[in-house]
Image: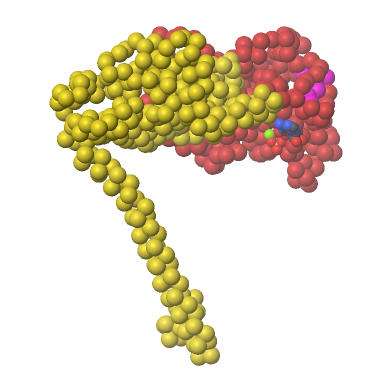
Amino acid sequence: MEIMVDKTGSGVRSSFNQAATLDRTVRARGIKSRLFRLAVIILTVISTAPLLFILFYIFRQGIHAINWHFLVNIPRPVGETGGGVANAILGTVLLILVASVVAIPLGILVGIYLSQVVTGRLAYWCRLSVDVLQGIPSIVIGILIYEWVVRPMGSFSSFSGSMTLALMMLPSIIKSTEETLKLVPGSLQEASLALGVPYYRTMMKVIVPAGMSGILAGVILSISRVIGETAPLLFTAFGNPYLNSNIFKPISSLPLLIFNYATSAYADWHQLAWGASMVLIVMILVLNLSTKLIQSRWKAQF
Amino acid sequence: MEGAVLNADGFNAYFGSNQILKDIRLEIRKNQVWAIMGPSGCGKTTFIRCINRMHELTPGARVGGSLTLDGEDIYAMNPVMLRRKVGMVFQRPNPFPTMSIYENVIAGYTLNNIRLTRSKKDEVVESSLKRAALWYEVRSALHQKGTFLSGGQQQRLCIARALAMNPEILLLDEPTSALDPMSTAKVEELLHELKTQYTILIVTHNMQQAARVSDKTAFFFLGEMIEQNDTKTIFTNPKNEKTQNYITGHFG
Ligand SMILES: Nc1ncnc2c1ncn2[C@@H]1O[C@H](COP(=O)(O)OP(=O)(O)OP(=O)(O)O)[C@@H](O)[C@H]1O
Ligand SMILES: [Mg+2]
């Protein structure tokens, strides 16, 4: 205010000095905030650049490997050129599919339960174990599944790999479902109950659909998190150089293939590993983008 | 008893050990409009939530005494069946956000898996929206989301949703407290039309509103029903001193 008064020339003389100082501080502040903004932008660029560079590098290395032949053929023996990663692509898809069939319904149900029951012993222990499960290193989950599934069944299998991934997907599906549904206003539940809709139908037909975008986003993020898992698959899904669609036989996956071929001594195989990396990255990008799409398209307004 | 749709006889309600309603006696006849009035916290909401058994959904909430609908004990009925006979409109409009206007109106049927033919659905939607005085505003946008409507339109949509089930009784908890005067006037007009077909209980803090829409008024105070009478009589000649004070604006 004082500054404006001063500038129009109608300011009181005695306040002139004061106003000038004020003017200077304000200008200094303006410079400071501009510097700050610049610093933020520079830092953002610095931290984003490596990510972009990684993406760029993988695409540059992988793009040569990728063609139709690469996508529909299985690896050739050492010495023969060509070959593809069809076995790993099919493996990854199958592993994720079976894991999802197990983890998605279970995770959503537990999430619904936790969103409804805020207090109580069971809910407390459930929340605690979800948190703990989230923190268990993937390799440890792999060992557990090896003991619980692979040994009793007598062989490595796609199924055991899927169980590993399912266990890893569960906590984030549960958490995102719980958090999403907690945000659905209680008035919706009342509206439905007041229409004479039984409780379970209210949950399934009103509350869950209202939180659908959040739940789906959580599910997809959980998939994109486990799709690149390698270590726990080493002693569960194991890997398989041939096409396999039997879930009780060992199966390959993109990360497993990348691990095996990148550490081999043959340039041809290195090339396959780069191509497989790019396929994997593209899958993850697509998953992430679809989350964004779902969130913007399906968001329910309360 | 003859003609009483809803009858409360020594009815009590509690939250835990806290008694909220004490010995309520009220006899509501068919096609009457009752205004439930009283200072904040006196148990009006609790009372109407007892009528469709929404009260018991709060952990620790209980009731005692007798409350009957058409002579049948409400607390011996299946709550789901009861709620189909007793429609409720809440203080804040709460249309289903995932559903269109059309789907919102017939939500009571679809959510309950009651199958209707296409033409029957259209008919229910049109007649309910007409009775809720919303039809002419939304008929060209029936397949838009209900949450895109204004607050007042949303509230009328919620009324249409309740009417679509053809309830015997309609409970309204301060239905216009979140609305502007225009929307309020529309909802009141609507209540006027509805009273030929329904028995209505409306909670309101607004005395003009009670005077405009209701035949009878029950006055609640600290969980007790201290006075009930024709609305006109209550406003012109209240017997109880507390009612008098409330009406003349000395408290509440
Ligand atoms: N969920 C609850 N748990 C415990 N006590 C409650 C609960 N809801 C309401 N009460 C208590 O019950 C009493 C009556 O509440 P009620 O909501 O019926 O009042 P009201 O007459 O509708 O008031 P208002 O005019 O402000 O809406 C209040 O004293 C309140 O503290
Ligand atoms: Mg209330």
Q: Quadrant of ligand 2?
A: top right
Seen at 41% across and 72% down, the residue is: A31
Q: Is residue A280 above or below residue A22?
A: above
In this rendering, position of residue B92 left or right of residue A220: right
Residue at far bottom of view: A13
In the rendered image of this protein, does residue B239 appear above or below residue A204? below
Instruction: Give the letter of the red chain.
Output: B
Residue B122 at least partly seen: no
Query: Which quadrant of the figure has residue B181?
Result: top right
Residue at (36, 15) in percent of width and height: A250
Q: Nearer the viewer, residue A300 or B161?
A: A300
Q: Is residue A135 left or right of residue B142?
A: right
Spot occupied by residue A115 in the image (x, y as percentages of width and height): 58, 28
Pinpoint residue B91: horizontal percent, then vertical percent.
Answer: 60, 33
Position in image of residue B49 (x %, y %): 68, 24
Q: Can residue B236 be seen by looking at this rendering?
A: yes
Locate residue A258, reporting x and y percent: 30, 30
